[in-house]
C-alpha cells in the first residue's frame, strides 16, 4: 500500500504502482478476512487504485 497519494502524484510510476496495489488487493481478498481492519485495508487499496487511474487517465 502506498503511504501517501497527493495531487502531485507522478503518473510515470502508475504502471508499477497499480500492479503492486492490485496484487496486494487480490491477496487480501483471497484471504477472505472479514474483520474490520482487513475491510478498511481493502477499501483503502481500492481508493488508491481509483485515484491513480483517474489522475493518470487510465481506463481498464
Image (spheres, grey):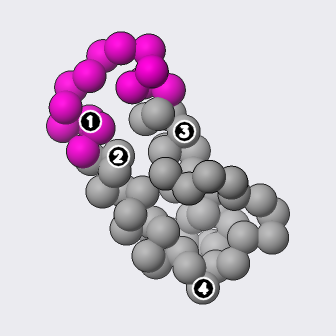
Identify the secondary structure beneath mark 3.
helix
Q: Spatial distance from mark 3 to mark 1, Cα to Cα? A: 13 Å
Residue located beneath label 3 in the image:
44
Quadrant position of residue 6: bottom right
Residue located beneath label 1 in the image:
29
User: Residue at coordinates 64% horizontally, 79% vertically from top-left?
Assistant: 11
Up-down relation of residue 59 to residue 12 (above or below): above
Q: Does the residue at mark 4 contact the one at mark 1 (Cβ under 8 Å)?
A: no
Q: Is residue 20 magenta?
A: no
Q: How many residues crowd around disc 1 within 10 Å: few (fewer than 14), some, or many (20 or more)?
A: some
Image location of residue 15, percent across then percent down? 46, 78
Give the side of residue 12 with respect to residue 45, left or right: right
Give the side of residue 24 with respect to residue 17, left or right: left
User: Can you see residue 50?
Assistant: no
> Sequence-wise, which precedes: disc 3 or disc 1?
1
Q: Does the residue at mark 4 contact the one at mark 3 (Cβ under 8 Å)?
A: no
Residue 12 is marked as: 4
Identify the secondary structure beneath mark 1.
helix
Per the rendered image, the range of residues in magenta is 27-40
Residue located beneath label 2 in the image:
25
Image location of residue 50, percent across then percent down? 56, 53
User: Residue at coordinates 38% horizontally, 63% vertically from top-left?
Assistant: 20
Q: Spatial distance from mark 3 to mark 2, Cα to Cα? A: 10 Å
Q: Spatial distance from mark 4 to mark 2, Cα to Cα? A: 21 Å
Give the side of residue 33 with respect to residue 8, left or right: left
Image location of residue 27, percent across then percent down? 24, 45
Up-down relation of residue 2 to residue 13 (above or below): above
Quadrant position of residue 2: bottom right
Q: How many residues crowd around disc 4 within 10 Å: few (fewer than 14), some, or many (20 or more)?
A: few
Q: Does the residue at mark 2 contact the one at mark 1 (Cβ under 8 Å)?
A: yes
Amino acid at each position: 500500500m502506498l503511504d501517501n497519494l497527493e495531487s502531485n502524484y507522478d503518473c510515470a510510476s502508475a504502471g508499477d504502482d497499480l500492479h503492486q496495489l492490485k496484487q496486494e488487493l487480490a491477496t487480501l481478498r483471497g484471504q477472505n478476512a472479514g474483520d474490520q481492519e482487513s475491510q478498511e485495508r481493502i477499501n483503502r487499496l481500492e481508493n488508491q487504485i481509483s485515484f491513480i487511474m483517474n489522475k493518470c487517465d487510465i481506463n481498464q
